[in-house]
């Protein structure tokens, strides 16, 4: 049963409820059974699909508070499956850094890099033994998120165990172009003695690069020769992509898009986000002093909301672009605050139709800017639960459509950002539960400490001591030590 709310206009509306058990059944089916055949075209992005499924389960099964009197439910993903899924994720890690997006792409590499040439814009020495990489940015982000989402309780520090942090950060630097933007993947071009960055100019890659950097990079001066991105160049690229009407696009001359706006805002927020205690409120200088026209951005994002209209009931009309937004009869009646008794949808661009995921992209973007008050949360919630939630669980892209894992995940994420009861507290910049962000912080600190030798075990200390003693007795390096590069234990 829903709750009955009395509105100022005297109407009584029964608010819809989120059937958590039904949604969990849907996600359990997605996790354990083969996905429907229309996912065959997504075979090359299995890591992405896994993130949508596991993240959704985590949103629906928050960690009980210490004062909770409700007995916890059995985990939908048992610890044994945690280990198996983690091994699957780690099997996609590439020797040159980063992760491949699908098991079907993993094959014995045949091409190796044979040069250490550097360029002025990208002064990184490639590893002569590193194979041609199958890694790309989205797969790397989703792999790291999955490892944190699958961490066992009490083992949070080991969530990134097995991740080659240094190589991945070096690989990340190679993906940045001279103008500050990022591509999706990088390959070494024999004969041209240069890295080829592929993937187009896409604000999503900028966001993903910053998110990976935040999850893996320690404090300045960590002494591992990792280096950093061209942060100032990246800021200039992102800030320079704001359009005349306040939105963000691939460049200032293109059509703005809500997904790009979210990525631009989230990337800027993560560039100025502390590494520890990061889920607490903190001032963000880059966001609030760098964006050229903040009022126009807020207006553009808030304007993505509209009162949803039912499409015409014509069975022969398959046009997805049929208008389903309410236009006022007079321009003077235009308002950014729709009546709270209606269903409020969001679109990604001007004059486009409703889509579940844009409630997330728009709502989370405004939340990252500290202006969640500009979202009609009640109307948005009603739209998601009344129009987009499917009877078998999950959410569809359009009203009346089948559920899918992408829109299912971000439908839940939007509700979590709204503070939906029964869902996990959600981080609107990293797109995982807040509890998972705390896991990432601990896992990163453990990797950094291991890189500095702080996590070295007693056996490694004995080996290092024996090598030091041998060097002192011989007065020089033995041949085998020179062959592996000297101080191999660091």
Image (spheres, rainbow, N blue to C red):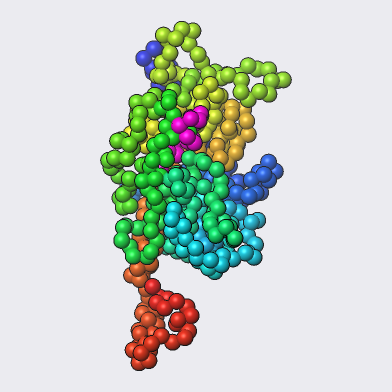
Above or below, comparing residue 376 to residue 188 in the picture: above
Q: Is residue 401 left or right of residue 438?
A: right
Any part of residue 386 in sight? no
Taking the image as shown, residue 461 lies to the left or right of residue 109, namely left
Q: Does residue 29 sit above or below 313 in this rendering? A: below
Which region shows up in magenta?
Answer: 250-267
The outermost residue toward the top is 330
Query: Which corner quadrant holds the C terminus?
Result: bottom left
Task: Examine the structure image and report whether residue 259 is included in the region drawn in magenta.
Answer: yes
Asked if residue 474 can be seen in this view, the reply is: yes
Tell me which residue sits at (49%, 36%) in the image.
250
Q: Residue at x 72, y 20 (%)?
A: 316
Left or right of 108 in this view: 438: left
Q: Position of residue 155 (x, y in %)?
A: 41, 61
Of residues 305 and 483, the one drawn nearer to the viewer in this rendering = 483
Coordinates of residue 84 in the picture (x, y in percent): 55, 61
Tally of marks: 0
* Residue sitting farthest toward the right: 316
Confirm whether the magenta stretch covers residue 54. no
Q: Seen from this angle, which residue lies furthest left?
A: 283
Residue visible at 55% across and 37% down? 407
Nearest the eye: 265 or 16: 265
How far across and down, in percent of the image, does residue 72 sit? 43, 49
**Residue 261, percent across and down?**
44, 34
Nearer to the camera, 72 or 340 = 340
Residue depicted at x 46% and y 50%: 176
Between 223 and 145, the one lying in front of the other is 223
């Amino acid at each position: 049963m829903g709750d009955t709310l009395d509105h100022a206009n005297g109407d009584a509306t029964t608010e819809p409820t989120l059937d958590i058990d039904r949604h969990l059944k849907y996600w359990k089916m997605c996790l354990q059974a083969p996905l429907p055949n229309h996912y065959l075209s997504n075979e090359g992005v299995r890591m992405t699909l896994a993130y949508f499924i596991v993240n959704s389960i985590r949103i629906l099964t928050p960690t009980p508070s210490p004062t909770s009197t409700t007995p916890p439910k059995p985990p939908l993903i048992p610890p044994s499956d945690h280990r198996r899924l983690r091994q699957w994720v780690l099997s996609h890690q590439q020797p040159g850094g980063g992760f491949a997006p699908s098991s079907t792409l993993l094959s014995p590499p045949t091409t190796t890099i044979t040069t250490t040439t550097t360029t002025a814009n990208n002064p990184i020495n490639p590893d002569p033994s590193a194979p041609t990489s199958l890694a790309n940015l989205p797969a790397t982000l989703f792999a790291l998120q999955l490892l944190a989402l699958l961490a066992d309780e009490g083992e949070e520090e080991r969530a990134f165990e097995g991740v080659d942090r240094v190589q991945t950060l070096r690989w990340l630097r190679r993906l940045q172009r001279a103008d500050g933007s990022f591509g999706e993947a990088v390959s070494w071009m024999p004969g041209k003695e240069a890295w080829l960055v592929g993937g187009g100019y896409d604000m999503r890659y900028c966001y993903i690069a910053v998110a990976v950097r935040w999850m893996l990079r320690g404090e300045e001066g960590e002494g591992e020769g990792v280096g950093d991105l061209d942060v100032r160049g990246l800021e200039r690229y992102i800030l320079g992509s704001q359009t005349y009407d306040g939105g963000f696009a691939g460049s200032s001359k293109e059509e703005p898009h809500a997904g790009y706006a979210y990525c631009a805002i989230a990337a800027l927020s993560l560039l100025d986000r502390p590494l520890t205690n990061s889920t607490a409120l903190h001032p963000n200088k880059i966001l609030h002093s760098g964006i050229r026209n903040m009022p126009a951005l807020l207006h553009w994002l808030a304007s993505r909301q509209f009162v949803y209209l039912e499409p015409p009931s014509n069975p022969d009309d398959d046009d997805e672009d049929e208008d389903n937004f309410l236009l006022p009869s007079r321009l003077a009646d235009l308002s950014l605050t729709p009546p709270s008794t209606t269903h409020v949808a969001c679109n990604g661009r001007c004059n486009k139709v409703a889509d579940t995921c844009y409630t997330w992209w728009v709502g989370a973007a405004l939340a990252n800017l500290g202006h969640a008050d500009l979202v009609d949360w009640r109307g948005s919630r009603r739209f998601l639960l009344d129009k987009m939630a499917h009877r078998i669980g999950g959410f569809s892209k359009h009203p009346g459509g089948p559920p899918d894992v992408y829109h299912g995940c971000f439908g839940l994420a939007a509700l979590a950002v709204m503070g939906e009861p029964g869902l996990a507290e959600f981080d609107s910049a990293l797109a995982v539960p807040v509890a998972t962000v705390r896991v990432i912080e601990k896992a990163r600190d453990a990797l950094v400490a291991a890189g500095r030798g702080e996590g070295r075990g007693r056996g490694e200390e004995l080996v290092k001591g024996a090598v030091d003693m041998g060097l002192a007795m011989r007065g020089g390096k033995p041949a085998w030590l020179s062959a592996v590069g000297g101080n191999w234990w660091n």
